Amino acid sequence: MRELKEKGIAIIFEKENINTMDAKGEVLLTILSSLAQDESRSISENSAWGIRRRFEQGTYKISTKRFLGYDYDKDDKFVVNKAQAKIVKRIYQEYLTGKTPDRIARLFRSEKVKNWDGKYNWQATSIDSMLRNEKYMGDTILQKSYTQDFLTKKRVVNDGKLQMYHIQDDHEAIIDIDTWNAVQQEIARREKYCEEHRTNAYAQLTETKPLSCKVICGECNYLYTRVQYTYRDGRRVAKWRCASTNKAGGARVCSNRYVLEEALIKLFIMSWNEIAGNYDEYKDFWKKNLKEGDELLRYKTKQIMAAAKKGKIKELDGELMIMAMDYIKIFESGRLVIRSYDGTEFECETE
């Protein structure tokens, strides 16, 4: 209004009989806008009060337009969309085989799996959100976010400032409770893993680099990174080195050794064939996991048992590696330790 006034342009409010070019125009507008803002605040508070009272009674309504897996039936009940539910189940299963949300999104786009809108525009953030959404296991948590400011309409995550309402067994589940808990434990495990090894991403491009983020420095706890060398005769060799060996102020931070990728692959194949070749000997160990372990350990143990039953491997199976292998730890002495998700460990020495 002031910018237009400076250019000699008036705004006429016919109902209120205000002309912004008059001296009293801005004063009247300030008073009226203050009253309107207070009315807006009052309406917002009343609406929020009504919503929270309905939450207390367990009454809610959410849009299923962008919510894959559920619809409302003719009686306005929350029901499973069976076709979409298959996609939801697959997302949870793929995640527990070691894939990242980004990998699952790229896989779905390549396979032209339809999203809620019938398109193939899968994003890692939406898949990550689906993996954390309690509605898929039959519960509902209300007021996970709220409008912080009635003027800006900005919504923020409820970090405990307002009460949340957890309704258990609210509707038919798509994901069983054991799988749900296993996924939440895996999410927490990956977050802790990234924090411990100082990385922002848990594995990248695992379809071509299954060792990504799985090789750890036993000296400084940094992750190893892949580097490729080309010799004078044209030969190209892939090696892995500690990420902290980069020059820092002219000095080498970590003195741990480089390891040929070929050696790491051979170690995985050797350790896996030890498990698969002695299946019966590991049965008691696996039975203990199934009896005493948490949901994630039980799930991973079942996966490893099923894969080991198929027998030994002769060459690298990338999908098997990301499903079964937790990490390989490298020590300056030449000792390598490989650990599987079921808790089995093997060691070897390199030159």
Image (cartoon, grey):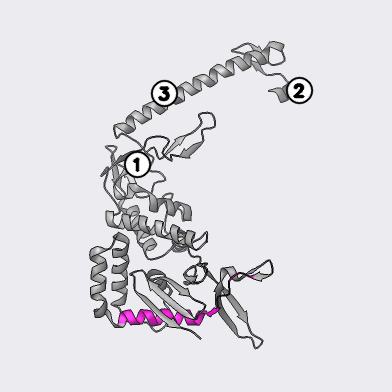
The residue that disc 3 covers is 46
Secondary element type, mark 3: helix
Marks 2, 3: nearer the viewer: 3
Q: Which residue is mark 2?
A: 6
Of labels 2 and 3, earlier in sequence is 2
Taking the image as shown, residue 72 lies to the left or right of residue 126, namely left
Which mark is in front, 1 or 2? 1
Mark drawn on residue 141: 1
Q: Please tell me how crowded label 3 is: few (under 14), some (14-19), or many (20+) other residues with Cα within 10 Å.
A: few
Most frequent secondary structure within the magenta stretch: helix
Name the foreground residue: 216 vs 297. 216
Q: Tell which of 282 and 87 is nearer to you.
A: 282
The label shown at residue 22 is none
Q: Quadrant of residue 303?
A: bottom left
Residue 98 position in % (x across, y down): 40, 65
| Type of amino acid at the residue the image marks with label 2 | Glu
